[in-house]
Image (cartoon, grey):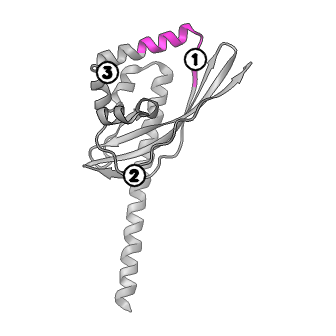
Amino acid sequence: MVRIGMACVVFVAAGITIQPDDAAKKATVKKLTQEIGDATLKGDHGKLMDHTYDGVIKELGGREKAIAAIDTIMQSMKSQGITIKSFKVGEPGEFLSEGGNTFVVVPTGIEMTFPGGKAIGKSYLLGISPDGGKTWKFVDGAGIEKQVVRDKVLPKLPAQLKLPAKEPPEIIKGQ
């Protein structure tokens, strides 16, 4: 009976030590995701690339080409009267591991205005850590919708990782 009681104490104590670790990882991931949103709003595309997964940067032709491409896209949006107004971060999901990497899905929301209205979109960032959560890089969920793209730029994903389905933005006219 004492052994069963001690085993329960050990399992409870182990759960207590694991939960704060996950809570700390979630807080770190959420903070980094907000930094990505803030960099996007400020037009700091260098900082955005600092947080972008290396496979994506490589696929875009390297850091400088990736920054130039984002600059061009953002300039085009601006010339069309499209402005990103806000970037919101939801609660990170479950941490899953595969092949030495840890993965987490972080829900995001973005509000953009355009002539005659606004769009509110939901998406996510996929966080990838090669060192158990000490450092993180991210990929925008919109860029990895297709399996062929995921296979090309990402490491092997855990079988139990469920990426959110793409949702069409809510368009509000006259805003």
Image: 56 above or below 73: below
Place of residue 75 in the rendered image (x, y in percent of width and height, measured from the top left): 48, 10
Left of 60 or right of it: where is 22?
right
Q: Residue at x 36, y 76 (%)?
A: 10
Quarter of the image that includes the N terminus: bottom left
Q: Earlier in the sequence, mark 1 or mark 3?
A: 3
Place of residue 50 in the rendered image (x, y in percent of width and height, measured from the top left): 33, 28
CB contact under 8 Å: marks 1 and 3: no
Q: CA distance from mark 3 to mark 2?
A: 27 Å
Q: Earlier in the sequence, mark 3 or mark 2?
A: 3
Kind of element beneath mark 1: strand
Q: CA distance from mark 1 to mark 3?
A: 24 Å
Q: Which residues are magenta?
A: 71-85
Q: Residue at x 45, y 39 (%)?
A: 31
- Residue 98 is covered by the magenta coloring: no
Q: Residues within 10 Å of mark 2 (few under 14, many from 20)?
A: some
Q: Residue furthest bottom?
A: 1
Quarter of the image that includes the C terminus: top right
Q: Amino acid at mark 2?
A: Phe
Q: Which residue is mark 1?
A: 83
Task: Determine which of the numbered discs, if any, sits on residue 60 in the image.
Answer: 3
Q: Residues within 10 Å of mark 3 (few under 14, many from 20)?
A: some
Kind of element beneath mark 2: loop
Q: Amino acid at mark 1?
A: Thr
Q: CA distance from mark 1 to mark 2?
A: 33 Å
Place of residue 169 in the rendered image (x, y in percent of width and height, measured from the top left): 60, 29
Task: Determine which of the numbered discs, if any, sits on residue 21 in the image.
Answer: none
Image: 132 above or below 125: below
Q: Which residue is mark 2?
A: 95
Q: Amino acid at mark 3?
A: Leu
- Residue 76 is covered by the magenta coloring: yes
